[in-house]
Amino acid sequence: MPNVMGSILLVLVGLIVGIIVMFIFNLIRKNSATNKADKILERARIDGEKIKKDYILEAKEEINELKIKTDEELKEKKAEVKEAENRIINREENIDRRDANIQKRENLLDEKEKKILDKQKDIQEQEANVEKIKEKQLELLEKISGYSKEKARELVLKNVEETMTLEIASYIKEKEAEAKLEVDKKSKNLLVESMQKYASDVVEEQTVTVVNLPSDDMKGRIIGREGRNIRTIEAVTGVDLIIDDTPEAIVLSSFDPLRREIARITIETLIKDGRIHPARIEEIYDKTCKEMKEKIIEYGQNALFELGLTKVEPEIVELIGKLQFRTSYGQNALKHSIEVASLAGIMAGELGENEILAKRAGLLHDIGKSVDHEMEGSHVEIGASIAKKYKESDVVINTIESHHGDTEPTCVIAELVAIADTLSATRPGARNDSLENYVQRLHDLENIANDQKGVDTAFAMQAGRELRVIVKPEEINDLESHKVARDIKKRIEDELQYPGTIKVTVIRETRAVEEAK
């Protein structure tokens, strides 16, 4: 028992000693950490003081540098201000000198004005005296000559008018001859060069299309039972089928070339297919219309490619292609437009104008004809509205509006396109002209000439290309015959519509005949 108590006491003593030792160890470690912290703080304080001093030194250096720079800038500014002040002073001195000079000039002008006023008074007095002298002289002349002032003026004016009329007519004749020689030479060279550079085949469209058949039996199949096939074809295509005794052929008749072409392709496809009945006819017709639209766009693209034009709206390309199936007096509208565009472009290039713009205006000048059967109005109005809708240039719009003289052309290109349009339309074989129009034009030419005073007879010759006028020699002299020719030319231009040009020739002849017996 005593041993156990001793062991317990030893354990308790050991625990107490251990606790005391740990407490002393923690106290020593705490004091060591405190000392280290104090040392670190002291070192940080010393480093902070050092950094602070360094920053203060750097700040002082920067302040000194800024002060030096500021002093230099102030010096420069003061120098500039000084120069500006000197310039202002010099200007003020110059202004003062100018003011002095202006004042002197004003004084001189005042003196001159006074002198001029005095001279004007003297002149007015002299003029009054001269007028009095003139009146006295006129009164004396009237008494001597026996003519009043008004009567003498009338005689002088009459003599002057007669003399000047002859001189003016002679001058006009001379200048006209010179101008015609020069203008004809230049214009002919220009037009001939243009036509030489561009030449196209003469194309004449007809109003019928012939479709060849493999045999005469096919005619019966096209007609169908009780004529149902032919009625369906005519109804969907809008053309007339003429089936007569012509062997192995039928005729499609229509004034619309596009309808005729669609009908031709439809019938040829039906013949190859062999199945000819109303449902199949409508099916083939619908398919042909879609293919024809693609073909129309291809025609428009080919025309643009041929002329080297780009950036054209797809809708306008389609309208251009439709011109392939439009005619004017038998002339293909698309080929006519391409020809006009080429001629206008060549002439524009020769004159230094925009060749591409001239081609574009020439190609689109008749664009209204592609839809004139679908819309109200003339092809000029329709074409102008189409050009405005798709934002074509003002030159193109004015060309469309003025190529038939409906409005005044505002640019050179519009004039060139009008010239090219006339060239394309009037070249040999380009268009058909009815006998009635031809006879009426000749009749109108002769009537215009016969209406002129002093004309004896008139003859329209060379298919209306020349008008020969015979005047009465006792009423019209040689110089007045030129005036008659000009008056007839003016009336023809104002009153008639005609292709190309008309030459007016005035003939005056006096014959004296005696018979010796």
Image: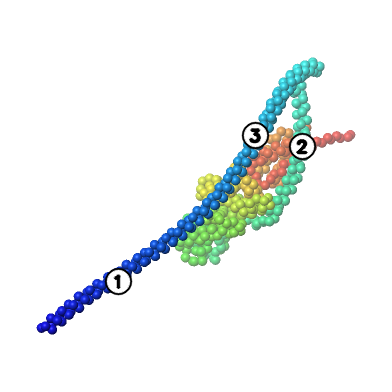
Q: Tell me which residue sits at (85%, 34%) in the image.
A: 514
Q: Quadrant of the N terminus?
A: bottom left
- Say which of marks 2 and 1 sits in front: 1
- To which residue does mark 2 refer? 171
Q: Give the CA distance from mark 2 to mark 1.
A: 136 Å
Q: Give the CA distance from mark 3 to mark 1.
A: 97 Å
- To which residue does mark 3 refer? 96
Q: Please provide percent x and percent y for residue 448.
A: 68, 38
Whether pointer 3 and pointer 1 mark residues with C-beta atoms closer than 8 Å, the reply is no
Q: Tell me which residue sits at (20%, 78%) in the image.
A: 14
Q: Quadrant of the C terminus?
A: top right
Secondary structure category for the residue under label 3: helix
Q: Please provide percent x and percent y for residue 499.
A: 65, 46
- To which residue does mark 1 refer? 29
Q: Is residue 385 above or below residue 155?
A: below
Would residue 202 be visible to someone looking at this image?
A: yes
Secondary structure category for the residue under label 1: helix
Front in this rendered view, residue 500 or 222: 500
Q: Is residue 114 left or right of residue 213?
A: right
User: In the rendering, which numbered label is found on residue 369?
Assistant: none
Front in this rendered view, residue 251 or 266: 266
Q: Tell me which residue sits at (75%, 20%) in the image.
A: 126
> Residue 109 lies in what quarter of the image?
top right
Q: Tell me which residue sits at (27%, 70%) in the image.
A: 27
Q: Please provide percent x and percent y for residue 51.
A: 44, 61
| Color style of the picture | rainbow
- Say which of marks 3 and 1 sits in front: 1
Q: Which of the marked residues, 3 or 2, is nearer the chain's N terminus?
A: 3
Label 1 Cα crowd, 10 Å radius (few <14 / some 14-19 / many 20+): few
Whether pointer 3 and pointer 2 mark residues with C-beta atoms closer than 8 Å, the reply is no
- Disc 3 marks which amino acid? Asp
